[in-house]
């Protein structure tokens, strides 16, 4: 809708209230899970059609503690269990879970971090587990909400310096990945800024919202000389673990046997979308702090839309990264001068010596993949007829090629101390068919085979025993109900309030 001139605070609050009421119309309850907002300084609200909670945050060391100030009806965020709907059989036995049986891990923290951003919206509308955006170009598999299935990403840590505990019924957050990897490498802690913005003396990154998961590390083993991270974009954790256990992902299974895997996953950050969480993994900071707020948002100061997650903007997507945010690459260089790092097919490439998008920014070219009929590890049933599967298969093939070039010194560089490889095929396939589909399983098999090529290269280099690995995703993926379609634009229009709805859920009132 058309933007209006700035309004006084009371008038603006009234408009936000009206927009919220429109979203909470009971007729929208099949698609609107809840609506989130910042009430005032350090106070937040979550509301649904049958309840509301208001909570306050306060400093607790370098982090936060939360107190519920009031609630009415059913508190939408009361259940924050991280173990809900795990393993896969339990998830499949509870399709499209309603709010009454769903869970929202770390919900208070998720809400608070987002509204720290000056670009945060007035309202965040979260869609239900059942909601399918089909009439808006959606997919059978969806994410974006903070319910446990959409938030749950896999996390596998393996190899040198890692505790071999197997698959354990535990969880963490994606912002914990970077500090844990840096601790694994042997980076010494020092001065930094914690979750609540206060100083901490045990930080591994200049801004560190996450915490080291010490139970994943072998305190007595030698530190690895190299760490390689694999991102399976959009992979449902339960599905990935199940396919590995049943022999359909033997290379993932090999890594799981060499370390510790979190059965309840690593919880992604609000919003549970691609680039906000790619950046959270690599920097250890929440989206509300690192500045990549969503795949798209509205910048009130510029009066402009910001889009980061598109083929035309990936190359420059880190332009809005907040000052003072370090990446794993940055810290490796700071802690181990002279080290080399690589970032393959990853928009969040800040600090990397070699980067796919760095080559493109410099005007270089990335080798083109072979024709589809010659493309290895590409399931023929899907790579030919499904455009997104074909495109992602080609991209992921070039990712392996780039890794091999870097690791074999073809760019004249030393072997990287840290290498990050982003695989995109799983996201395309899990969206297309849903997490339990044949196309999703095929994407895991194909990606697993590409991981196998990389593991083979590490072995051939003679450094496998001195290398650690991790597998993670940027968010989960949930099966939706094709019968629950539609959007909330009509309800918002009927309020008469001027607004922008960015990335389906970030509502800016009187932008």
Image (tube, rainbow, N blue to C red):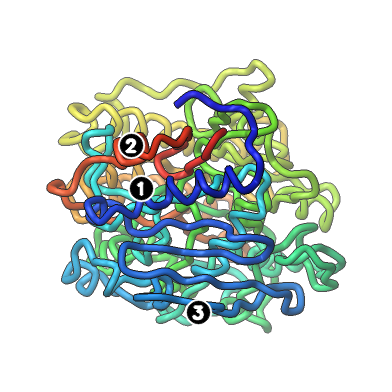
Residue carrying label 2: 494
Q: Is residue 311 visible?
A: yes
Q: Alpha-carbon distance for marks 3 and 2?
A: 57 Å
Q: Quadrant of the N terminus?
A: top left
Using residue 329 as the reference point, say whether residue 77 is left or right of it.
left
Disc nearer the start of the sequence (3/2)? 3
Q: Residue furthest left?
A: 483
Disc nearer the start of the sequence (3/1)? 1
Q: Position of residue 22 (x, y in %)?
A: 35, 47
Q: Quadrant of the C terminus?
A: top right
Provide the secondary structure element on which disc 1 rests.
helix
Residue at x 43%, y 45% (from the top left corner): 19
Disc nearer the start of the sequence (1/2)? 1
Q: Is residue 158 visible?
A: no
Residue at x 58%, y 37% (from the top left corner): 347
Residue carrying label 1: 22
Indicate which disc residue 164 carries: 3
Using residue 469 as the reference point, say whether residue 328 is left or right of it.
right
Look at the numbered discs 1 and 2 and tell me whether their residues touch, using CB distance below 8 Å.
yes
């Amino acid at each position: 809708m058309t933007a209006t001139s700035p309004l006084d605070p009371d008038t603006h609050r009234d408009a936000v209230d009206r927009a919220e009421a429109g979203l909470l119309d009971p007729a929208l309850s099949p698609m609107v899970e809840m609506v989130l907002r910042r009430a005032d300084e350090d106070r937040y609200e979550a509301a649904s059609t049958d309840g509301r909670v208001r909570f306050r945050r306060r400093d607790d060391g370098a982090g936060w503690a939360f107190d519920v100030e009031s609630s009415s009806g059913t508190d939408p965020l009361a259940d924050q269990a991280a173990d809900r709907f795990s393993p896969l059989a339990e998830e499949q036995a509870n399709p499209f879970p309603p709010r009454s049986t769903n869970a929202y891990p770390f919900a208070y923290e998720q809400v608070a971090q987002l509204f720290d951003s000056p670009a945060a919206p007035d309202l965040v509308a979260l869609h239900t587990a059942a909601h399918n955006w089909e009439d808006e170009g959606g997919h059978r598999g969806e994410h974006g909400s903070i319910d446990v299935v959409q938030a749950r990403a896999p996390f596998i840590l393996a190899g040198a310096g890692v505790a071999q505990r197997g698959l354990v019924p535990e969880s963490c957050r994606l912002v914990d990945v970077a500090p844990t990897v840096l601790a694994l490498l042997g980076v010494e802690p020092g001065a930094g800024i914690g979750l609540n913005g206060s100083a901490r003396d045990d930080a591994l990154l200049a801004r560190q919202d996450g915490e080291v998961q010490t139970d994943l590390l072998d305190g007595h083993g030698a530190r690895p000389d190299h760490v390689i991270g694999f991102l399976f974009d959009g992979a449902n954790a339960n599905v990935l673990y199940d396919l590995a256990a049943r022999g359909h992902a033997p290379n993932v299974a090999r890594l799981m046997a060499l370390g510790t895997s979190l059965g309840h996953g690593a919880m992604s950050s609000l919003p549970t979308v691609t680039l906000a969480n790619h950046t959270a993994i690599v920097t250890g900071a929440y989206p509300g702090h690192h500045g990549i707020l969503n795949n798209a948002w509205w910048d009130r100061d510029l009066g402009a839309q910001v889009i980061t997650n598109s083929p035309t903007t990936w190359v420059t997507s880190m332009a809005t990264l907040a000052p003072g945010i370090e990446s794993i690459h940055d810290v490796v260089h700071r802690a181990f001068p002279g080290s080399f790092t690589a970032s393959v097919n990853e928009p969040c490439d800040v600090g990397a010596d070699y980067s796919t998008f760095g080559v493109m920014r410099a005007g270089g070219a990335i080798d083109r993949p072979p024709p589809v009929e010659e493309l290895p590890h590409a399931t023929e049933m899907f790579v030919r007829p499904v455009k997104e599967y074909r495109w992602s298969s080609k991209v992921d093939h070039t990712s392996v090629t780039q890794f091999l070039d870097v690791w074999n010194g073809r760019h004249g560089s030393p072997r990287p101390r840290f290498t990050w490889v982003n695989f995109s095929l799983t996201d395309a396939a899990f969206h297309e068919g849903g997490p339990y589909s044949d196309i999703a399983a095929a994407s895991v098999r194909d990606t697993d085979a590409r991981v196998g090529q990389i593991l083979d290269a590490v072995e051939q280099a003679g450094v496998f025993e001195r290398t650690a690995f991790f597998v993670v995703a940027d968010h989960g993926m949930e099966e939706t109900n094709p019968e629950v379609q539609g959007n909330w634009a009509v309800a918002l229009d009927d309020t008469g309030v001027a607004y922008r709805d960015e990335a389906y859920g970030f509502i800016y009132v009187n932008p």
